[in-house]
Image: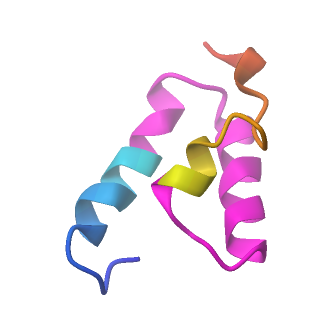
Amino acid sequence: MLRKPGGDREMADILALVLQHDEQAVLIAVELALAEGVPTKTHVLNPARTDWSTAR
């Protein structure tokens, strides 16, 4: 992610999710995206894959 243009900003956006959502939910979403081989903000935020009902 950090090797592509804008990847640093995308990583910061993903890390900032813990300010709005439960840390465990963010961790699970990131782990799923990594396991699928698509570590992008789009895949982490995909509501079809992520239960954000644990928002702070």
Q: For residue 49, what is the image quadrant?
A: top right
Describe residue 37's horizontal placement relative to residue 12 as left or right.
right
**In the image as oriented, which residue stretches furthest toward the left?**
5
**Does residue 28 appear to the left or right of 13 in the view shown?**
right
Residue 40 lies within the magenta run: yes
28 or 48, which is in the foreground? 48
Which residue is painted at 48% across and 54% down in the image? Answer: 41
Q: Which residues are magenta?
A: 15-41
In the rendered image, residue 51, in percent from the top left (x then y), is placed at 79, 29
Left or right: residue 16 versus residue 54 is left
Image coordinates for residue 48, horizontal then vertical, percent:
77, 38
Residue drawn 68% across the image and 64% down it: 33
Query: In x, y percent, where is residue 22?
Result: 66, 27
Quadrant assignment for the N terminus = bottom left
What secondary structure predominates along the stretch shown in magenta? helix
* Side (left or right) of 34 relative to 13: right
Residue at the image point whose x is 61% and y is 12% from the top? 56
Question: Percent x, y for residue 23?
Answer: 65, 36
| 33 falls in the magenta region | yes
Nearer to me, 32 or 27:
32
